[in-house]
Amino acid sequence: MTIHKEGYTSIALTLLIIFVLNAFIDYRYADITWLRWLIYIVSLVLFITVLQFFRNPRRAFVSHDKMIICPADGKVVVIEETIEEEYFKDKRLQVSIFMSPVNVHINRNPISGVVRFFKYHPGKYLAAWNPKSSTENERTTVVVEHESGTPVLFRQIAGALARRIVWYVKEGDVVEQSKEFGFIKFGSRVDLFLPIGTKVDLELNQIVRGGITVLGELP
């Protein structure tokens, strides 16, 4: 396992805070042993917690031309038909994956193809399970067109804890299935909007892994 590049600054800031806090406690409360040990333990837990947020585990990623691969680790919280208002403006099959703070936070391309649309939206930080988060939270929208002509829209959505969305794609890019397209710090949600009739192989509350779990098959 390695540490993702998006974690370097956060980890460095965490170490700085831990160093300053422990130095202050050692200087000001050197004679209170229990307090010093409490701060040591809290500091260690904090460091390990931040470190696991940015882990990048080694995986054998799945690549299959006709399949749609899950773009993120997490739990499936939505599988339903809905109207996609931003790009398609028609009925689509929505699949949403919620990423908790303990999940890997890397986002991966569900299909290979060409990026036909990209847009970043600043916004609020409602809880990721709030239905309004899809349209009111900070988010990005990416549409990738498969070589067969089928477009798939996927959206990074920030949550109550996530305060920074990172993306690595732009319109016109050729992207490869299961490769990184972005990162959401401290978790949130990824929504996919698929053509009606897409065969989905997931169930609600199923735990999935980005770049590995097969979501469904392109129509």
Image (cartoon, rainbow, N blue to C red):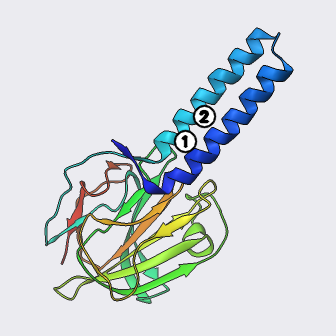
Question: Measured from the top left, where is residue 81 in percent x and y?
Answer: 38, 74
Question: Measured from the top left, where is residue 173 in percent x and y?
Answer: 32, 83
**SS for callout 2:** helix
Q: As displayed, is residue 75 above or below residue 113?
A: above
Answer whether residue 186 is visible to the viewer in this image. no
At 54% from the left and 79% from the top, the residue drawn is 120
At 62% from the left and 53% from the top, the residue drawn is 161
- Which residue, as the protein is rendered here, is positioned at the far left? 65
Q: As displayed, is residue 60 above or below residue 191?
A: above
**Taking 136 as reference, is 20 left or right?**
right
Q: Quadrant of the N terminus?
A: top left
Total labels: the figure holds 2
Q: As displayed, is residue 55 above or below residue 215?
A: above
Q: Residue type at mark 1? A: Val
Neighbour tally class for label 2: few under 14, some 14-19, many 20 plus, Cα within 10 Å: some
- Which residue, as the protein is rendered here, is positioned at the far right? 28
**SS for callout 1:** helix
For residue 46, the mark is: 2
Q: As displayed, is residue 69 above or below residue 55?
A: below
**Taking 186 as reference, is 194 left or right?**
left
Q: Residue type at mark 2? A: Leu
Callout 2 touching callout 1 (CB < 8 Å):
yes
Q: Which of these two is toward me, 127 or 122?
A: 122
Residue occupied by mark 1:
50
**Taking 74 as reference, is 101 left or right?**
right
Neighbour tally class for label 1: few under 14, some 14-19, many 20 plus, Cα within 10 Å: some
Question: Measured from the top left, where is residue 123 in percent x and y?
Answer: 65, 73
